[in-house]
Amino acid sequence: MYIRKHIHWRVIWRHSWKDVFLFLTYDLLLAVLYGPLHWHWLDVPWQLVSIVGVAVSFYVGFKNSSSYSRFSEARQLWGGIVNRSRSWTMLVLGHTQPANLVTTTLAQLAFQRQLVYRQLAWVNALRLHLRRQPERWQAEVAPLLDPAEATQLQQLANPPAQLLLRQTQALREAEGLFSELQLRTLCEELREMTNLQGGCERIKNTPFPRQYAFSSLVFVWLFIALLPLGLLAEFEKLGHGHYWLTVPFSVLVSWVFITIELVGHISEDPFENRMNDVPMTALCRSIEIDLRQMLGEQQVPAPVQAEHGILY
């Protein structure tokens, strides 16, 4: 996620220089054909072009609004994951029965720590699952789990869902550690985390409707193709040779429209680890810091820092 207040011009140029070069070439070609070669039949009534432009503006605006809604929902889901992780840890650590109801105090503390660390494993496993990065399991998830459990889970199709199942099974085995009401509360937390994971998977596995995304792109390029044809005669009315003004103005308007289209396109899939996506790595690290400090640990990792204004 890009977090700086202003986007650096280098970032804008890196994403748009090819389109600008294409617009410039196309508009120059039309200006040469219209002026020096006298192909005046190329001009199109400006009223037609303006009607197309207005229609495209409404359509692209609708598409961008829908794309942003996907990003906004994804960020809300991960906000829920942050809150549920803290709530789970507070319930595990604060709602236990007195120590004399379990074998030993050390065993109780070890069990609590296992439940909290499995929660850390779940958030990181969900991040890798959404980003399709199974190769990072051993480095980022396995150290949080028992080695045998980590090896077994890595072979499964949906490790995050299996981790939630392991949490449920662990609660069933925690005889005497929680009251019946506390167990129901913890199971409700697991159910809510399952819903949050399902919401993330729904966004990940359901692409933005292609009929909207593709039509938007086609309409924008159609308008860009018609734009200089409508401006040639309009600028020529200002005086002989003014048709050359079509080139800079057409390039500028074309760049605006294609950039608006690009903004909507890059918001369609918020879990791809790109510069404008949900910063799941930073959120997972924030959860890890909070939960490990709740356990009383002193050595915790530092927060993830932005790289060139981008928080991953």
Image: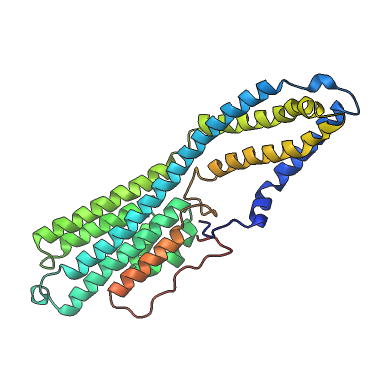
Residue at the location (49% across, 45% down)?
269
Visible residue check, residue 237 = yes
Q: Position of residue 308 (x, y in %)?
A: 59, 63
Residue at the location (41% across, 43% down)?
203
Q: Is residue 265 left or right of residue 79?
A: right
Q: Nearer the viewer, residue 222 or 39?
A: 39
- Farthest right residue in view: 36
Relative to 202, say whether 191 is above or below: below
Relative to 125, say whether 92 is above or below: below
Residue at the location (86% across, 22% down)?
39
Q: Position of residue 190 (x, y in %)?
A: 24, 54
Q: Position of residue 149 (x, y in %)?
A: 33, 63
Visible residue check, residue 154 = no
Q: Position of residue 207 (x, y in %)?
A: 47, 38
Residue at the location (61% across, 23% down)?
51
Q: How is the image coloured?
A: rainbow
